[in-house]
Amino acid sequence: MPFQFRQRVMKKLYMLLLLICLPLAGLDAADKKDYEIYLDSLDYYLQQSDKYVDRKEGRIAVLEEYLKNNDLPPEQRYRYLLLLFEEYSCYQSKLMYETTQQLIRLSREMGDKDKLVNSEISLAYSYLWSGAFKEAYEYACSIDTTQTAAATRVRYLMFQLDLDFESSLYVKPLRFFMPKYKNNLRLVVGELEKLLPPDDDRLLEARQKECANNGQYDKANEYLQQRLRHSAGISRQTAAKLSDVGFMNLEMGDTVTAVKYMVKGAIMDILIGSKQAPALRKIAETIYPDGEVERAYEYIQKAMENAVFFDSRYRMYESSITLPLIDKELYELTKSQKEILTVAVCVIIVFCIAVVFLYAYIRKQNRKLRHSTRLIREKNRSLLTMNGQMADINKELRSANNIKDVYLGRILADNSSAITDIEELAKTVKLKVKAKQADDLIPFIYKKDYAKKRKEMLAGFDAMFLHLFPHFIEKFNSLLKEDCRITVEDKNTLTPELRIFALVRLGITKSDVIGEILNYSSSTVRNYKTKIRNAAVVPNEEFDKRLLEIESEI
């Protein structure tokens, strides 16, 4: 029965191979706007993708039906579970994980260590492809490959190779991690060289990934071409090889060849119903800068849907980097198209009105109409200009009034508090003098915590200012270079630099006045100003102008 099942599967795969080769056979001879013909082929298969997923689910259903038979011999059940794992490995990580658990239990019952270790390696792969790299590393370290066959040891090394290679891609922007993975890959390749013949596909894959990790993309591509020469039929492995050839050509700057191979790899992934298709995301990243925004958006959306369905945090993270960029480009394109359409409609409407209007009056009032139209337009422009100016003035007046009201209330409250303190001090001094306790005056005066009073005054100023300008810190930081931006520990408290420029925003520009308010020397205030202006991303004049343009939101 398993042989018949596999025979039917191979027959279907052979038919699918014919389907994929027919539309791609003419790619090398095509001369249609660079790589557009390749993308046309991909679009066709993406439209048919649900059909191929249904076929994959049919194969899975058949295997699950076989496994319902409780009388299956352990060896046969193990083979069915392996086939099911292969189907799940590019379909959904949760089902992949559950199948490996069944494989591990069955292997232990059978008492076969090679099967057990292979099942544990499969479990580690379920961690890897779901994006749980840390768990994959930890679990792989717990696998004991001693007293196992050479083939089992080779598969364990291939897992280490995949794990280190995928991890290096993940942390590639953090270059200080790369030496660790380069060393790991070199050790794995060295071990495989001892176990495998020179022309073995697994050894060629290991050397290819080591070269790619070291930036030797041309050499990695040579290994890939050797591997492709020995590849036949439609399989996940062939799809990965085709995609990798595309990735290598992309790194070498040959975009057309890269897209060609990535499209072939993506189509093969579609044909096997795979939800693990990194080529689709790479194609989107490659074509959207060339204006293929709508296609790129469709591809990256499909890549994200696949990642979510498979439940791969790694693939979701990869797609989430590119998706917002393409989404923004598509939004801008759609917006531009809508604006053009709106302008076109408006122009047509105005044109029709003008034609009808001119047709009725052109003979008698042509000159008068032109003159009147010109005057009206001039007056309209003048009125619009005046209205705009008035609106700006009113806005500034409202803002100034709001600031004045808030600060006036605060000043009255602070003055009232200060007068109360002075009256209390005078009253106490008077009593002490009358009681002839002059020696107690100095300790009494110093009993007052004037530093705390000043700190409370500044805290009150900060709170009041941020109430008026709640986004002042963010807008002020946008005027500074990224590495010079000011960080506040408390979002309701200003730093000395921010406090100085807050006073400048309120119209207090003289350094000596600012120094008196904040208890700084004039030179200290000037130094703060110079430091901030030197860190600005715009000239000093523009910086002052942009600072004053920060609006109150009260």
Image (cartoon, rainbow, N blue to C red):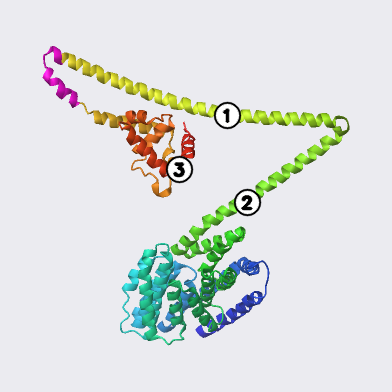
Residue 29 coordinates in the image, percent (x, y)? 67, 75
Residue 297 quadrant = bottom right
Q: Is residue 59 above or below residue 193?
A: above
* Residues drawn in magenta: 432-447
Disc 3 or 1, which lies upstream in sequence?
1
Which residue lies most toward the top here?
434
Residue visible at 35% across and 69% down in the picture: 180
Q: Is residue 491 magenta?
A: no
Q: Is residue 286 above or below residue 407?
A: below
**In this figure, which residue is indicated by the disc labeled 1?**
391
Nearest the eye: 235 or 209 = 209
**Badge 3 element:** loop
Compared across the picture, whether 452 is left or right of 304 comes to left
Can residue 169 be seen from the camera position used here? yes
Tell me, for residue 479, which label it has, or none: 3
**In this figure, which residue is indicated by the disc labeled 2?**
334
- Answer whether labels 3 and 2 touch (C-beta < 8 Å): no
Q: Amino acid at mark 1?
A: Ala
Which is closer to the viewer, label 3 or label 2? 3
